[in-house]
Structures are given as C-alpha cells and as structure tokens.
Image (cartoon, helix red, strand yellow):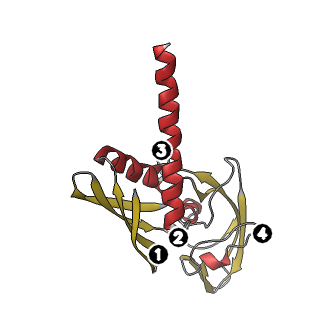
Amino acid sequence: MITIKEKKKTRIGEEFIFSLKAPISFSNAIRRIMISEVPTYAIEDVYIYENSSSMDDEILAHRLGLIPIKGKPLLENEVITFTLEKEGPCTVYSSDLKSENGEVAFKNIPIVKLGKGQKIKIECEAIPGIGKVHAKWQPCNAVYKQIDEDEVEFLVETFGQMEAEEILEEAVKILKNKAESFLQQLELIEQ
C-alpha cells in the first residue's frame, strides 16, 4: 500500500515523499527501477553545422545531452528534434533550443557564451532511454529509510522531465511486468 505524505516543487523538479508497505526487497526494486529503468528523453545525437565559439564540439554536445527534456516517452523510437542558431555577443541558454514537438524542462540553463562574431548552428535529437544506459536519462534520485519491519518511507527528487507520481506509476508498472514475466517462466519450467 502506497501512502503519499508530501509533494512540493523545487528549483530542479519535485520532491515527493511517500511510504510503502511491502517487503524491503520490493522497496529496493521500486527504488532501483525509478532511477534506472523508467524511460525519459535526452539529447543523444548532435549535428554541429557551425561552431566558432571557444567551446569544443564534443563539450558542447555533452552539455546539450545533460539538459532535461520534458515528457514521458510513449514509443521506443520517438525522436524530438531541436534546432539552435545564435550569434554573439550573448549567452546561449536552454530556452534557445527550438522544437515543434518537445520542450526543455528548464529555460535558464547556460550552454555557451558567444563573443562578438561567434556563431553556433546546431540540430540535435532527443530520444528515449533509461538511466541504466546513461545518467542523462535518469529521471530522479530516490532513497528510502525503513520505518517498520514491512514499511519504508521514500524521498524522490525529480529532475524536471516527468512528475514524481508519473515516475512512481511507471516504476510499479515495470516491476509488475517483470514479475509476470518471471512467473510465466516458472510455469514453463514446472510443465
């Protein structure tokens, strides 16, 4: 049984506290799935057409990959395309990433500072992935403490891509599917 205790907005997402009455092994499975198996979007492919800034292409691509992208992936092969074209002198922020089918979670993340005459022209693609593959797809941090023999209290801090309750629901769904698959395999062995 899940009991929601507190939910509040933070400057980087949400803080969500809930308690769970279940064996400690299930609690740990939920925590690990929330961190590493709930799919989110992150920028993976970056096409740099022009970069006369002082930042190397590789560093620029890495910084773009760490910008949280809003949304819950519905399909495995979905792609959100962003474009970015700026000329200095200015500071380029995440709000400068333009897309028709997606948006960044935070508009005020600095990407690069452009001097006079410096330009960047970039196209990048955000794709679904999981935290197990790379931390840029990790939707939250989750910790728990044991309150009772069969009850734990979770603290979940999200990074802006998804709502905390959405992450929890998705984690429970993934755990349920894994358990059902495991039971089917056991039934095959028994036959």
| Residue type at the position of mark 3 | Leu
- Examine the rendered structure and indicate whether residue 96 appears above or below residue 55: below
Disc 4/disc 1 C-alpha distance (Å): 24 Å
Query: Of the residues under marks 3 and 1, which one precedes in the sequence?
Result: 1
Helix or strand or loop: what does disc 3 sit on?
Answer: helix
Q: Percent position (x, y) of residue 7?
A: 43, 75
Q: Percent position (x, y) of residue 70?
A: 61, 67
* Disc 4 versus disc 2: nearer the observer: 2
Query: Of the residues under marks 1 and 2, which one precedes in the sequence?
Result: 1
Helix or strand or loop: what does disc 1 sit on?
Answer: loop
Q: Percent position (x, y) of residue 85?
A: 72, 74
The crowd level at tag 3 (other Cα within 10 Å; few <14, some 14-19, many 20+) is: some
Residue beneath disc 4: 100
In the shown orientation, is residue 66 left or right of residue 2? right
The crowd level at tag 2 (other Cα within 10 Å; few <14, some 14-19, many 20+) is: many
Helix or strand or loop: what does disc 2 sit on?
Answer: loop
Q: Please give the name of the residue rendered at 48% of the width and 68% of the height, measured from the top-left corner.
A: 159
Query: Of the residues under marks 2 and 3, which one precedes in the sequence?
Result: 2
Disc 4/disc 3 C-alpha distance (Å): 33 Å
Residue beneath disc 2: 160
- Examine the rendered structure and indicate whether residue 101 appears above or below residue 34: below
Helix or strand or loop: what does disc 4 sit on?
Answer: loop
Query: Of the residues under marks 4 and 2, which one precedes in the sequence?
Result: 4
Residue beneath disc 3: 175
Disc 1/disc 2 C-alpha distance (Å): 6 Å
Q: Which mark is residue 12?
A: 1
Q: Are marks 1 and 2 in contact (CB under 8 Å)?
A: yes
| Residue type at the position of mark 2 | Gly
Query: Of the residues under marks 4 and 3, which one precedes in the sequence?
Result: 4
